[in-house]
Image (spheres, helix red, strand yellow):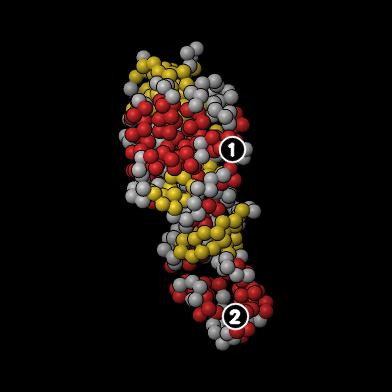
């Protein structure tokens, strides 16, 4: 029987951060993962450049049934703390936009930094290890694994959510939570592209690869970012952001003229350029191809002077408040996060310890805390891991 102070299951962002921090405190830490390599999502993240935090992180950037839960951990390990570690390791980075910090080189810089910190603090990382059973004992927890039995005082679940099963995601953390009496909130894919199957599918396919600035809104929340047409529907940061607020059957509103009041702009064009065709004017804002396709799909393009006030209002409605009901999302296959998960009302916001089973901790994405797009999910992984590491 291998006996240790702390076992962390899941060598992803949260697990590695918790391991290095607890090991720095002098705790004997074993980090177990069933995958063949640690931190696969870190490597894939940010298009290979890892958007490792956001300079403007605040609790409002997170979704949870219990919105106050994330505040304490985020305040005790901030984006500036993580940036300090990145700077200490000489990892070059830059702000891409909106406070989003990316590696100049590769995501592997961040993973290597975490692995180096784990190694120098003495955390014992064991990959290719399947967890077969977990039991509570008087000592703490006992684990049956493919690498033999382990026991520990503190057991940390850092197995993440369901997004991207090919990167090692499983529902294991939820299973452990259920085993120890925790409630789970329904999970669904977040930060995920929409699929379109109605008559708009042809438009999306034709425009696949085209990106436009827009305001996407759903259920009272809006994001101004780029929208990207794809072969299957819609993607791009505006769509990924709003997808976390969308549930099946909800309508999404897209304003394709975010810098204008659509009707006022059309009326002004009608007054100033009465002989110009609508698609010519749209071609000055969008690509020519997009302008032509929008004009063919939604309107009868004619010289501006020929539009009646009612027709102009209809055009404004489409351009400024395009309503669409996505058929669905691309699901966990491509989602960046899993919404829902372990109900935080049964976990201490100070220590991340289970209120149902002492010595059991949940950190990272397995909890019902999901960030907006832009480095917030990693910041939650770092902060929740750091919080737990002070107490394990
Ligand atoms: C393609 C992609 C790009 C992303 N880009 C960004 C970005 O740029 N910025 C950002 O902030 N967020 C990004 N995210 C989200 C971010 O990666 C996650 O929120 C974050 O990794 C969650 O950390 P975690 O440690 O909780 O889980 P994970 O990083 O998913 O780690 C979980 C670990 O647990 C292991 N595990 C799972 N099941 C078991 C089991 N049964 N037994 C043993 N081990 C198990 C897995 O192998 C994995 O190593 C991205 C996500 C994806 C999918």
Q: Which mark is residue 71?
A: 1
Which residue in the rendered view is the most extreme toward the right?
310
Residue 365 visible, this orientation: no
The residue closer to the viewer here, 252 or 352, is 352
- SS under mark 2: helix
User: At x 33% / y 50%, what residue is drawn?
Assistant: 105
Is residue 260 found left or right of 22 in the rendered image? right
Is 147 drawn above or below residue 102 in the view shown? above
Is 219 drawn above or below residue 75 in the view shown? below
Mark 1 vs mark 2: in front: 1
Which residue in the rendered view is the most extreme toward the top?
138
Task: Please give the residue where the numbered disc 2 appears in the rendered image.
Answer: 269
Percent position of residue 352, x then y: 54, 29
Q: CB of mark 1 within 8 Å of CB of mark 2? A: no
- Disc nearer the start of the sequence (1/2): 1
Classify residue 169 by image quadrant.
Answer: top left
The residue closer to the viewer here, 327 or 54, is 54
User: At x 40% / y 21%, what residue is drawn?
Assistant: 28
Percent position of residue 195, x then y: 49, 56
Q: Residues within 10 Å of mark 2 (few under 14, many from 20)?
A: some
Is residue 11 found left or right of 57 in the rendered image? left
| Quarter of the rendering occupied by the N terminus | top left
User: At x 42% / y 64%, what residue is drawn?
Assistant: 208
């Amino acid at each position: 029987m291998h006996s240790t102070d702390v076992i962390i299951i899941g060598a992803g962002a949260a697990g590695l951060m918790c391991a290095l921090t607890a090991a720095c405190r002098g705790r004997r830490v074993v980090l177990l993962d069933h995958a063949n390599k640690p931190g696969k999502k870190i490597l894939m993240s940010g298009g290979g450049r890892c958007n490792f935090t956001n300079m403007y992180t605040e609790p409002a950037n997170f979704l949870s049934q219990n919105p106050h839960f994330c505040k304490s951990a985020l305040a005790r390990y901030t984006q500036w703390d993580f940036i300090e570690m990145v700077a200490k390791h000489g990892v070059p980075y830059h702000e891409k936009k909106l406070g989003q910090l990316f590696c100049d080189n590769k995501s592997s810089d961040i993973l290597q930094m975490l692995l180096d910190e784990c190694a120098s603090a003495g955390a014992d990382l064991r990959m290719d290890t399947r967890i077969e059973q977990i039991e509570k004992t008087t000592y703490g927890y006992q684990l049956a694994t493919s690498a033999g039995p382990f026991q520990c005082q503190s057991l940390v679940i850092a197995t993440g959510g369901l997004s991207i099963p090919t990167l090692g995601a499983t529902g294991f953390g939820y299973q452990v939570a259920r085993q120890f009496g925790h409630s789970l909130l329904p999970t669904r894919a977040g930060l995920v592209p929409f699929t379109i199957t109605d008559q708009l599918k042809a438009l999306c396919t034709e425009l696949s690869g085209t990106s436009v600035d827009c305001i996407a809104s759903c259920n009272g929340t809006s994001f101004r970012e780029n929208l990207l047409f794809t072969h299957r529907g819609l993607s791009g940061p505006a769509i990924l952001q709003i997808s976390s607020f969308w549930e099946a059957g909800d309508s999404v509103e897209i304003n394709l003229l975010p810098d204008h009041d659509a009707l006022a702009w059309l009326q002004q064009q009608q007054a100033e350029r009465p002989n110009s065709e609508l698609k010519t004017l749209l071609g000055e804002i969008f690509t020519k191809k997009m302008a032509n396709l929008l004009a063919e799909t939604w309107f009868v393009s004619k010289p501006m002077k020929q539009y009646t006030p009612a027709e102009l209002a209809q055009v404004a409605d489409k351009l400024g408040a395009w309503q669409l009901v996505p058929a669905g999302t691309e699901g966990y296959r491509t989602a960046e996060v899993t919404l829902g998960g372990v109900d935080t009302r049964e976990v201490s916001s100070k220590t991340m310890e289970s209120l149902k089973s002492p010595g059991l901790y949940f950190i990272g994405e397995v909890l019902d805390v999901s960030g907006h797009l832009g480095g917030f999910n990693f910041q939650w992984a770092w902060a929740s891991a750091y919080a737990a590491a002070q107490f394990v």
